[in-house]
Amino acid sequence: MEKFVIRGGKPLHGDVYISGAKNAAVALVAATILCDEPCVLENVPEISDITKCLKILKEMGAKVELLDRHTIKIDTAGITNPSVPYELARTMRASCYFLGTLLGRFHEAFVPMPGGCDLGDRPIDQHLKAFRALGATDDIVNGNNHVRAEKLSGNQIYFDFVTVGATMNAIFASVKASGLTIIENAAKEPHIVDLANFLNSMGADIRGAGTDVIKVRGVEYLKGVTYATIPDQIEAGTYMVAAAATGGDVNICNVIPKHLESISAKLRKCGVNVVESDESVHVWVDGPLMKTSLKTMPHPGFPTDMQPQFSTLLTLADGTSIVTDDIFDNRFRYVGELRRMGADISVDGKVAVIQGVGKLHGAPVVATDLRAGAAMVIAGLAADGVTEIDNIEYIERGYEAIDEKFRKLGADIQRVYRPDADSVAMSG
Ligand code: EPU
């Protein structure tokens, strides 16, 4: 086990290059199961969630070849059994994407039920609702979700609320179903659009991705393609907030600025300068940080995956900010850790009241989940003194080479081996 040791208080300066999006790449990797020929995926982030997804494919019989650090050739022709191995899948939420892709290809799937999770209970009732609408039945067999259909037929699917995972799974299961599927109240996240673009480049017929009505007309054959994953909106947002929290001046490169608008808008409210170019955003601070309030929302609203990082920034601002995050049950678990660094935050259910304290102070802290871990890194970079962060395997699920990237921006962050540690990171 390893931990990060950060000597904080240094403004970040320079250019940082953003990797491919985790939440797009996990869906694209799963989608290769639906492709009738080998595919090459480019700009795949080098993170542990992707390593796990690729291991799942390999254990099921796929050929996976790393052409370089970020380019992977995947041939899923060798998969014959639609069962996902328990040990690999149980700690990864995105393993539920195999339900939709295996159902779409084999008309049957066995996928271990996701266990309890660091963000609270995460049911899949809407995923199952979509599969049932297309003609599938479901039950639990040996701790696995089992879905099965004689035939998948297009239908109307109306989600009770906006859900990224169920929208992805509805697309997976309908892309080769017969006839037209209409997905209403669909999620509009950039990774939904990326999945639709990937499948359309193979020959699928998916329209409306990025709006709340997606129409999928089933096709019989999907051809192999080479496709590049979009840049990671949340990784970019994390570096934007880190630049602001340290009073720095950073160019965040290889991004789609449109995907960052909700984050840029909130940073400007706090008095941070954000200037967008074609494929980069320049973030710098030349005055005091100001309070702002925010509520997380599905895209294009402010993303829940940026809430812990932004709340950390608000601990450094003048005045009182109110942050509401009701997407998941339990996304304020990191607050106790920030309090150990001097933050003044009170939480009542899904609302946090943050009284700006101007400065944080280094302390030993723990990453309680992926984005909470990123928040601890930002807190450590901005704080006086030394911060030690445990459970960094959470952070490595979704951030490629985070310590290297911050070091290039002038941070003092070291990775230190910790022989006595024992931790289990559950993926989001
Ligand atoms: N929900 C249900 N029933 C369902 C599906 C969802 O009750 O059938 C609930 C969830 O429990 C949650 C809310 O609906 O309270 C939204 O869940 P959603 O399905 O949108 O989330 P997800 O697909 O499980 C993805 C990302 C998360 C991100 C959310 C929201 C992946 C692999 N994960 O999760 O990413 O927070 O969308 O944008 O794409 C992260 O990257 O740190 C992360 C947690």
Image (cartoon, helix red, strand yellow):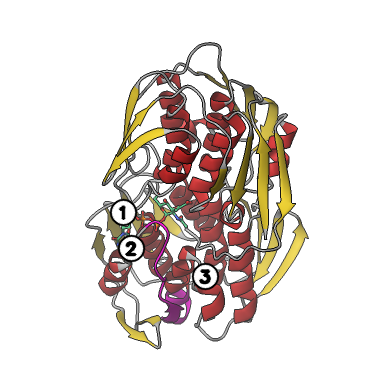
Q: Position of residue 328 (x, y in %)?
A: 33, 52
**Is label 2 or label 3 in front?**
2
Q: CA distance from mark 3 to mark 1?
A: 33 Å
Q: Is mark 3 within 8 Å of ligand 1?
A: no
Q: According to the image, label 2 marks what residue?
A: 121
Q: Is the residue marked 2 within 8 Å of ligand 1, measured from its CB?
A: yes
- Amino acid type indicated by mark 2: Asp
Task: Decide: is 330 above or below 1.
Answer: above
- Secondary structure of the residue carrying numbered label 3: helix
- Near-viewer residue (87 or 247): 247
| Residue bearing mark 1 | 329
Q: In the image, what residue occupies the spot 40% across and 24% down?
A: 356
Q: Are marks 2 and 1 in contact (CB under 8 Å)?
A: yes
Does the segment drawn in magenta span residue 112? yes
The Cα–Cα distance between marks 2 and 3, rounded to whole angstroms, is 29 Å
**Image coords of residue 227 (percent x, y):** 62, 53
Residue type, label 1: Asp
The residue lying at 26 percent from left, 51 percent from top is: 185
Q: What residue range appears in magenta? A: 102-119
Residue underneath mark 3: 34
Q: Nearer the viewer, residue 194 or 309?
A: 309
Q: Residues within 10 Å of mark 1 (few under 14, many from 20)?
A: some
Query: Which of the marked residues, 3 or 1, is nearer the chain's N terminus?
Result: 3
Q: Quadrant of residue 311?
A: top left
